[in-house]
Image (tube, rainbow, N blue to C red):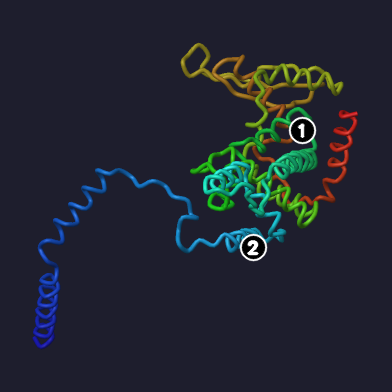
Amino acid sequence: MMLFSVTRSLLRGAQRIDTHRNRDVHRWVAPTLRELRRRREKMGPEAELPRSSHSDWNYNAEIFAFGKRLQESFDPNVLQQAFTHQSFIEQEIRKQAAVGIEQPVLGVTDNRDLIVQGERLIADNVEAFLLTALSRLPRQFISSIREALTSEAQLAHVSSHLGTKDIIMAAEFPVGDALMASTLKAIVAALQRSSGDERCFLFVRDFICGQLNQRDLYEYLHIPDPLRMLQEYCKEREIAEPEPRLIGNVGKNTLLAAYNVGIYSDRKLLGTGYGENQMTAVQEAASDCLRQLFGTEVHMKPVDFRLTLKDCARHMAQHTSGKVETRQ
């Protein structure tokens, strides 16, 4: 009984405290908050403002923090140039001309030359990495994977996740994919000028080639007719012509028919496939054969992201010499 009486007294005290707290909230608070919310919804969403419009913005600190986040050593002047686009320079010149400054001095340079250099560096490093990591894949498919990795949308995706959006100095806002992709190219060139080829290669390997992690590489190949591609592949490498054979079927002449086709070459099974008809099963079997020959099986080993510039130096040299011969 003593315990129940103590509990009742504590509950009464809690109720008195809640009642006292509720008395502190005036009746006009809830209607006012509802009215403010109604007006805010009527005005619509607020316009997106650049991070530089905040009072605590410090551009030098942002530039310094960007390099430290990536654990890279950048030359601050070169990195600032990488983030400065031509549109920003033109905008500042117009602003100073409007207030009567005839020969404005900005003290910064735009990143056009860095973009050109970075685009070449990204293409060379990505292709050298792919040629080394996917040595069994034909060159034409290496090029298709490289184009997918270095596309504007993919580079913009990487650039946005590196935190470049708020540091880019451009007249355009919000920043589009084209600006973010070109900024990433300039950053790669700035890193090469600041820290050398080795750090540049590792940066491209980790952030651009790293997008291949846990992806089915066969999706990048775009093969419309797998059987024809398999026949051409075997002919180029002097392999016996592939021959499709029906291994088994179930549910023939029904809606749930399934065919199992195997493709043989010189009495050796190259791959198998299933389909609702024989033609579909043949194409699936040809796709399975190409996966086996190209080293892009579903159960393939993960791409080796431990490769260094030294490991890829041979393909890098071949790629560079090929460009020189083409220019000549």
Q: Answer with the quarter of the image where residue 85 lies.
A: top right
Locate the C terminus by quadrant. top right
Q: Which amino acid, mark 2? A: Lys
Q: Which residue is drawn at 76% across and 27% down?
A: 140
Mark 1, other Cα within 10 Å: few <14 / some 14–19 / many ≥20: some
Numbered badge on residue 45: none
- Up-down: is 9 above or below 285? below
Give the camera-side residue of 261 and 63. Answer: 63
Q: Which residue is drawn at 52% across and 17% down?
A: 257
Mark 2, other Cα within 10 Å: few <14 / some 14–19 / many ≥20: few
Badge 2 marks a residue whose secondary structure is: helix
| Residue 131, position as x, y percentages in the image | 79, 38
Badge 1 marks a residue whose secondary structure is: loop
Q: Name the residue under label 2.
A: 68
Instruction: Answer left or right for 298 relative to 135.
Output: left
Locate the N terminus by quadrant. bottom left
- The count of marks equals 2
Q: Distance between the residues labelled 2 and 1?
A: 37 Å
| Residue 309, position as x, y percentages in the image | 81, 50
Q: Name the residue under label 1.
A: 137
Q: Residue at x 57, y 59 (%)?
A: 59
Q: Earlier in the sequence, mark 2 or mark 1?
A: 2
Marks 2 and 1: which is nearer the front? Answer: 2
Q: Answer with the quarter of the image where residue 218 lies.
A: top right
| Residue 43, position as x, y percentages in the image | 27, 44
